[in-house]
Image (cartoon, rainbow, N blue to C red):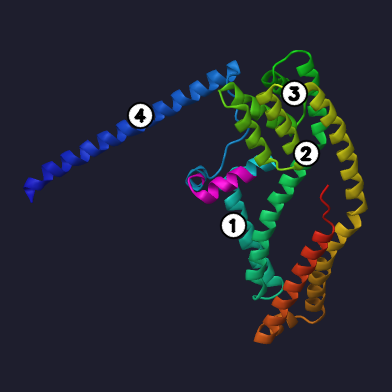
Amino acid sequence: MNNLVLPTIGVTLLCCLFGVMGVHAYAAGKSQRQALVDRLSSTGQIPVVGRRRRFGGLDRRLRKTKFGKKLELKLVSTGLDITPGEYFVYVIAGVGALWLIASSVLASFFGPLAGLLALWGANTFLNWQRAKRTERFINQLPELSRILANATQAGLALRTSIAMAADELEAPAGEELSWVARRLAVGESLDNALGELSERLPSRELVVLVTTLVLSNRAGGTVVSSLRNLTETLEERKETRREVKTQLSQVTVTAYAVPGFGFAALLLLNAVMPGALDRMTSALIGQAAVIVALILYAIGFVVIRRLSRIDI
């Protein structure tokens, strides 16, 4: 036993020495990294970080998965300043909160349904943000086409025209074109850079513009006249889309009001007869009736939205 004391003490001291060296190396590397970031930020070579990102470890592991890559692409297309890890944690927290609220306010049977509704709502929110950003980008396409036509007519190259348009236009067109300009600056082809843009913000108008620019760049045709004609067409489509959206606003409100009335009826029933929902969902026939009613409300919502969707 006495023979093991000295080796044990030696190994312990050696581990402590390695631990101290590791902490010192980590602190030195962190300070050097911060000094490098401060120096580059002061010279304008990299942007200053706006806020500290949360859940960094989860975000890195999530980005390596197929689901994380798709989620990152969707978040980029929405323009939200949030990482996939942060979005995942917030969605899980929202699902848990709605689950508890529905179980306590209505009945325990509505907890899982509220969790599924929260997942659907999170995905719908991202789709709505992307559609909203795409709509704003489409409204800027006539001005973008006009700037490109003027710059091309002045003798500038198409890559230079895109960079100039990125500086003059506001978000989201300015942000997206800045991304395209950076890709072109590092040697990316025009076809790939503009193709990624059309994938992030899918729309017929953008596809037409991208196709016109790509074909003109390949064949060397009259890009100025093509952009002039495209500008007039985009202006007309913009006004038409605005009129259609105004005419269908009442139908859109009806699509959201129908399921809202059903949820309000559940709250009213539970307020008039406390515990009625709990007693109803305790039986199998009551659970089946609630599920069938939710399915019918969902079908009505989808049908009304489909009827109000007009492709222009």
**Amino acid type at mark 4:** Ala
Q: Which mark is residue 165?
A: 3
Camera sees residue 126: yes
For mark 2, give the secondary structure.
Answer: helix
Front residue of 110 and 100: 110
Q: Secondary structure at mark 1?
A: helix
Query: Magenta region's main secondary structure?
Result: helix
- Disc with the residue nearer the chain's start (4 vs 1): 4
- Which residue is under mark 2? 205
- Asked if marks 4 and 3 touch (Cβ < 8 Å), the reply is no
Amino acid identity at mark 3? Ala
What's the residue at 69%, 49% (across, down)?
126
For marks 1 and 3, give the CA distance. 40 Å
Residue 196, percent from left and from top:
63, 36
Under mark 2, the amino acid is Glu
Q: Verify CB contact (< 8 Å) between mark 4 and mark 1.
A: no
Quadrant assignment, res 72: top right
Q: Left or right: where does residue 51 sit relative to residue 27?
A: right
Q: Which comes sooner in the sequence, label 1 or label 2?
A: 1
- Contact flag, marks 2 and 4 (Cβ < 8 Å): no
Span colored in magenta: 63-74
Residue 92's tag is: 1
Q: Residue at x 84, y 26 (%)?
A: 228
Q: CA distance from mark 2 to mark 4?
A: 54 Å
Classed neighbour count for the residue bearing mark 2: other residues with Cα under 10 Å, few (<14), some (14–19), many (≥20): many
Nearest to viewer (mark 4 / mark 1): 1
Choose between 227 and 77: the one closer to the eye. 227
Residue type (three-letter) at the residue carrying disc 1? Ile
Q: Element under label 4? A: helix
Is 126 a magenta residue? no
Residue 25 numbered tag: 4
Disc 1 crowd, CA 10 A, few/some/many (<14, 14-19, 20+):
some
